[in-house]
Structure formats: structure tokens, C-alpha cells
Image (tube, rainbow, N blue to C red):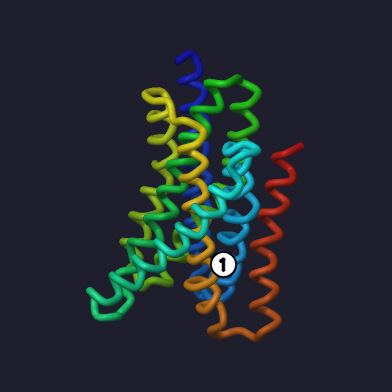
């Protein structure tokens, strides 16, 4: 509890970074194909370079097979939800307006939970985790906006998801002061989300990036998103 004021400050900073990234994405909607390409690379990068390594670390030496199974399960589960809701809604794509942004918002909730739990370990650990979260929250905000727009969401609905994504870390930090999540459970959750994010990036965002730009430009923006997450993760590990 002694770290509550500090974690709340970190949570507010994370919320501000998310809003800033999402606002920039809304401002530059005319270049949506580039935004989708960048976001596809960033979302895939978060899955492979952030969520998956953290899940493996929490699982310990005996848990890699369980983590990879959870990643596959997350991919299949998201695909199944996508197909099932497409069938129920007639295949018009409207079901994705909340499914994708909602997944990213839950990821932000887990970010906040991770910050709170890290500060319970030590201040040093808490600051390291907080730095990693803060440096990619602006990208999270942009990804939430891009995915909502790609799924046919209105600007008002997109802004509501951006607000929800910004508030999610604060809620996660609050939850961390009320409960203790075993590493094994947190590892599985992160792996499941990694699988879901791989589906979002490869099956939803990447195809939409091909509209309105050449092959080289699409590859460049996707690579830029992936490279940015790589740089962020390398810097946060220093």
C-alpha cells in the first residue's frame, strides 16, 4: 500500500500517453492505410517481443510448452469468436467494432496490473515495468484507434474505446492493491493475449494496410511498427 500514490502517478502518465497516441491517430485518419500497416507491425511486435517473453519468464523453466499451448489457444479462441460473431451478425464485420479494441483494452488493464504487482516486489522492479509500459502506451492508443476504425467503428465509438484504454491501466493498478495473481495464472493470460494479438495483427490489420499504397510502402510501415516495439523493449531492458 505504501506505493499507492506513486503507482497512481504512473497510471495517470500511462493514461496520458495512451490518449496522446490515440489522438494523433485520429488526427491523421487520411493516411489510414499507413496507420494500419504500422499498427499491424506494432501489435505483432507486442505479442512476440513483449507478451510472449514475459509469459515465458513468469512460467519458469518448466512452463514453455504450457505457454506456447496458451498462445495457440488464444489465436484459435480469437479466430473462433471472430467467425462465430460474424455468423451471428451476418458477416458484415460490425462485430469487430468492440472485439478488437476490447482485447487491447484488457491488455492495458493487465499492464496496470503488472505495474501494481511489480511495485509490490520492489520500487526498482516497479520502475522498470512502469518504464516498459509507458514507452509503448502511446502505440497502444494508436493501435486501439486504428483497430476500431478498421472494424467500422464511428469516431465517437473510437473515442470511447480510447478513453477506456486510457483508464484501463489505472483500474489494473487498483486491482493489484486488492489481490495477488499467481505467476502461473498471469503467464497464461499473457500468452493467451499474445495469440489473440497475432491474429489481430496478421488477419485484421495487415490486410487493410494494402489499400491505397504500394507493396514497398506497406512493408515499410509494417516493419517500422515492429522495429519500434523492438527498440522500446531493448531500451526498457537496459
Q: Which residue is drawn at 60% across and 19% down?
A: 122
Q: Residue at x 64, y 78 (%)?
A: 218
Res 86 → quadrant: bottom left
Residue 49 spot, x, y in % from top left: 65, 52
Classify 12 as above or below 123: below
Along the horizontal axis of the image, is 237 left or right of 115? right
Badge 1 local density, few (<14 within 10 Å), some, or many (20+)?
A: many
User: Residue lying farthest right?
Assistant: 238
Residue 26 spot, x, y in % from top left: 46, 63
Q: Which residue is drawn at 64% across and 46% down?
A: 53
Along the horizontal axis of the image, is 159 left or right of 225? left
Residue 197 spot, x, y in % from top left: 50, 59
- Closer-to-camera residue (20/49): 49
- Closer-to-camera residue (157/55): 55
Classify 66 as above or below 32: above
- Closer-to-camera residue (178/155): 178
Q: Which quadrant is home to the C terminus? A: top right
Classify 194 as above or below 31: above
Q: Residue at x 50, y 78 (%)?
A: 208
Residue 223 spot, x, y in % from top left: 69, 68
Res 134 → quadrant: top right
Classify 226 as above or below 123: below
Q: Which quadrant is home to the N terminus? A: top left
Q: Mark 1 points at which residue?
A: 40
Figure disc tally: 1
Q: What element carries label 1?
A: helix
- Closer-to-camera residue (225/35): 225
User: Residue lying farthest top?
Assistant: 2
Amino acid at each position: 500500500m505504501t506505493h499507492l500514490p506513486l503507482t497512481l502517478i504512473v497510471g495517470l502518465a500511462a493514461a496520458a500517453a495512451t490518449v496522446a497516441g490515440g489522438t494523433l491517430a485520429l488526427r491523421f485518419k487520411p493516411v489510414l492505410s499507413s496507420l494500419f500497416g504500422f499498427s499491424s507491425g506494432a501489435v505483432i511486435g507486442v505479442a512476440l517481443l513483449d507478451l510472449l517473453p514475459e509469459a515465458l519468464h513468469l512460467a519458469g523453466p518448466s512452463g514453455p510448452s504450457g505457454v506456447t499451448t496458451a498462445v495457440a489457444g488464444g489465436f484459435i479462441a480469437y479466430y473462433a469468436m471472430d467467425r462465430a460473431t460474424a455468423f451471428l451478425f451476418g458477416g458484415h464485420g460490425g462485430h469487430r467494432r468492440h472485439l478488437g479494441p476490447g482485447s487491447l483494452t484488457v491488455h492495458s488493464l493487465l499492464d496496470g496490473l503488472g505495474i501494481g504487482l511489480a511495485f509490490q516486489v520492489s520500487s526498482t522492479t516497479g520502475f522498470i515495468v512502469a518504464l516498459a509500459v509507458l514507452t509503448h502506451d502511446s502505440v497502444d492508443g494508436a493501435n486501439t484507434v486504428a483497430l476500431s476504425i478498421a472494424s467500422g467503428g464511428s469516431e465517437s465509438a473510437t473515442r470511447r474505446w480510447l478513453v477506456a484504454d486510457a483508464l484501463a491501466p489505472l483500474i489494473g493498478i487498483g486491482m493489484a492493491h486488492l489481490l495477488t495473481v499467481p505467476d502461473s495464472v498471469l503467464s497464461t493470460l499473457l500468452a493467451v493475449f499474445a495469440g489473440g494479438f497475432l491474429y489481430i495483427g496478421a488477419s485484421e490489420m495487415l490486410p487493410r494496410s494494402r489499400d491505397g499504397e504500394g507493396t514497398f510502402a506497406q512493408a515499410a510501415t509494417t516493419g517500422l511498427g515492429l522495429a519500434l516495439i523492438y527498440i522500446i523493449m531493448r531500451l526498457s531492458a537496459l
